[in-house]
């Protein structure tokens, strides 16, 4: 004798969905939700900064892609910052190593944001590509780990950075700006991607 059990999901006793059955018979597990990539449209850079808000509170990993941005002003590096309710302008513990093909190596730190240290002059010859990634440190309520992997066509710079910041709440926004906040971006785009739990 054949028996049929009809269900759409199986839950853990704490009411967390463990297994879900789709209308087409497909099965997904709760861990799959970490790979639920949500993306927005690319935003063209202009003005002195671009802030993207609306990041959901259940975002597991947030990544901002930098697609060839460059500035009209010189003597200022590009800078990445995050925030909860507003952009945090202090409290970062940031380190970056930026070697160039010409032999120069910059190892720098900052408390005001996550700086590039490789695109300080103006024009498309100082464009930046790559990404910044933000992940919540589970052991601390609102501590966020930030890493970067970037390149610039300025003397073939390659940039790797890491740091963290303690926010006053849950991350809900990111920003791409400059160190002094006054140099104007003349081109390139940024693109936000995040996974949800």
Image (tube, rainbow, N blue to C red):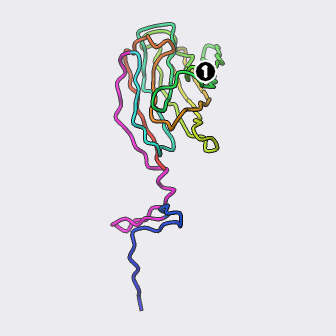
Q: Nearer the viewer, residue 165 or 7?
A: 165
- Residue 65 visible in the snapshot: no
Image point 57% across, 38% down: which residue? 142
Residue 1 against residue 176 in the figure, above or below: below
Quarter of the rendering occupied by the N terminus:
bottom left
Element type where label 1 sits in the image:
loop
* Left or right placement of residue 195 versus residue 163 in this view: left
Q: Which residue occupies the foreground of this view, 61 or 149?
A: 61
Residue 9: image quadrant is bottom left
Give the image location of residue 102, x and y in percent: 61, 13
Residue 30 forms part of the magenta stretch? yes
Q: Which residue is mark 1?
A: 111
Q: Residue furthest bottom?
A: 1
| Residue 46 shows in the view | yes
Q: Which residues are magenta?
A: 19-47
Q: Residues within 10 Å of mark 1 (few under 14, many from 20)?
A: some
Residue beneath the point at 53% across and 35% down: 134
At x 46%, y 30%, the residue is 174
Residue 27 percent location from the top left of the image: 43, 65
Whether residue 158 sits left or right of residue 63 in the image: it is right
| Residue 11: percent from left, percent from top | 48, 66
Answer above or below: position of 174 versus 20. above
Q: Could you tell me which residue is drawn at 41 percent across and 86 percent down?
A: 3
Please give the count of numbered marks on the rendered protein: 1
| Residue 20, position as x, y percentages in the image | 43, 64
């Amino acid at each position: 004798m054949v028996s049929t059990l009809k269900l759409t999901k199986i839950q853990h006793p704490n009411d967390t969905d463990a297994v879900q059955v789709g209308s087409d018979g497909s099965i997904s597990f709760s861990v799959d939700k970490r790979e639920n990539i949500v993306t927005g449209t690319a935003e063209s850079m202009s003005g002195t900064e671009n802030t993207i808000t609306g990041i959901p509170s259940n975002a597991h990993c947030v990544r901002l892609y930098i697609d060839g941005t460059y500035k009209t002003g010189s003597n200022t590096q590009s800078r990445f910052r995050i925030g909860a309710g507003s952009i945090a302008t202090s409290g970062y513990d940031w380190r970056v190593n930026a070697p160039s093909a010409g032999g120069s190596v910059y190892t720098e730190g900052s408390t005001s944001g996550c700086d590039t240290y490789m695109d300080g002059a103006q024009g498309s010859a100082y464009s930046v590509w790559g990404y910044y990634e933000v992940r919540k440190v589970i052991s601390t309520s609102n501590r966020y780990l930030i890493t970067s992997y970037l390149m610039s066509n300025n003397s073939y710079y390659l940039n790797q950075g890491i740091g963290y910041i303690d926010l006053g709440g849950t991350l809900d926004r990111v920003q791409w700006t400059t160190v002094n906040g006054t140099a104007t971006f003349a081109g390139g785009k940024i693109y936000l991607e995040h996974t949800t739990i």
